[in-house]
Amino acid sequence: MTTGGPAVACWIMHVDLDAFFASVEELLNPALRGKPLVVGGRPEGRGVVSSASYAARAYGVRSAMPMAQALRLCPQAIVVPGRHQEYSRHSHAVMDILYEITPAVQQISIDEAFLDVTGCERLWGPPEAIGRLIQRRVREEQGLPISVGIAANRLVAKIACDAGKPQGLVLVPQGEEAAFLAPRPIETLWGVGQVTGRRLRALGIATIGDLAAWDEERAVRTLGERHGRGLWRRAQGLDDSPVQPGSERRSISQEQTFAHDVADRLFLERTMLRMSEAVAARLRRRGWVAQTVRIKLRDPDFVTQTRQETLAQPTDQPEAIYEAARRLLDAHWTAGRPLRLLGVGVDGLLDEAGYQLTLFERDDQRRIRLNQALDEIRDRFGDEAITRAALLRRQHRPEEPDPTEGV
Ligand SMILES: [Mg+2]
């Protein structure tokens, strides 16, 4: 080892399938290829865009945008409802390819993962060759486009990947992290959501380089000890968060066995809402977000059915979990069918550090603050201390069976 140089060069890779759901739809129906294609819920159902092809993005259509707005921007867009089992199948196949490269894979959403490829050179060649290999295998074996970012750490690898989309491969040489980040909008940085972004812009910081040029102590004075120091370090291109393999495999769930079999839809919905609140509270306490929502239905004769839906955006919000659970109930439960047990769960759990608040829609900010306040009360008084208005509205219903908690 030469003295003075870096001890070990770390190589972190971020891979992200391009317009994933839309790309799978194009694969399944080649007639859609190159057309403005939007996957998501119907506008009349207040649906949102979960994925838009690049032809649709050219009109300004983006993920998480209300479908009605997407169709105003691009009236000729082809809207498809989404086939989550297909997406899930392709996602697993892509992740299997990644696990063949290295076990150090951290899946952070259905279409994204970090890999730590430090020390993989002997087996697979230099990092850039590994990136090309992944792109070629995903294209040839799954028929899907994927972008790759490679850098010394997760932060820079993720931003490099986004910078090269679609079908890009961007490698940031060691030592050039700060220079690579400098010209990019300040909102690109992890930890800069809309609120912090506005605040920084008011202070004259428009790019990451503007913040990097500040004195560290000034950042701390202006933005607070923890937040200020963290942002300032990231603006220098520094990030020592490790790739944590396997973090997508955790799950959180709640279920309830009813004292009497239940066939009352409103009662089932109310139970799901309460469970969604509890599951979301547990996610937030751990600082996680979930990618997948599932429900569990058990008949009086103990036949058990589990159905799941992949969310367009990872969430720790009870509304998003509840809405997905209700869609699953709509699809898999027929009115009048009695249930012995009902459960709501989430998996595909992600460390939220990799996500910016801009992932959430603007209106969600208020709910996030509300939910933080509710969490504090729950921590003090327990999960049952709080019942939300939406839940209370239904509590006047008479003749409801008295549920007992399942174990
Ligand atoms: Mg993607």
Image (spheres, grey):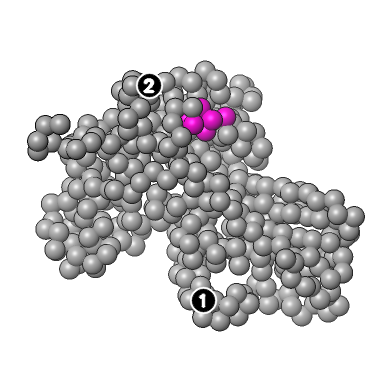
Considering every residue shown, the one lying at the far front of the view is 1
Can residue 299 be spotted in the picture? yes
Please give the name of the residue rendered at 28% of the width and 48% of the height, measured from the top-left corner.
239
Our reading of the magenta stretch's main secondary structure is helix
Give the class, few, some or many, for how many residues have Cα within 10 Å of label 1's Cα (few <14, many ≥20). Answer: few
Question: At numbered mark 2, what does the secondary structure look like: helix, strand or loop?
Answer: helix
Q: Specify whether 352 is left or right of 273.
A: left
Q: In the rendering, at what x and y percent does residue 366 appear?
A: 46, 68
Magenta segment = 93-99
User: Residue at left 41%, top 26%?
Assistant: 167
Say which label, 2 or 1, has the lower sequence index. 2
| Amino acid at the residue labelled 1 | Asp
Work out whether 369 lies above or below 7: below
Instruction: Reply yes or no: does residue 56 show up in magenta.
Output: no
**Can residue 98 be found in the magenta stretch?**
yes
Q: Position of residue 124 (x, y in %)?
A: 38, 21
Taking depth in this image into account, of 188 and 217 the one nearest to the observer is 217
Instruction: Name the residue at the left extreme.
Output: 3
Number of callouts: 2
Q: Where does residue 333 sit, x and y in percent of width and height? A: 81, 53
Numbered tag placed on residue 379 in the rendering: 1
Q: Residue at x 45, y 52 (%)?
A: 351
Residue 123: image tag: 2
Q: Does 311 sit left or right of 230 as displayed?
A: right
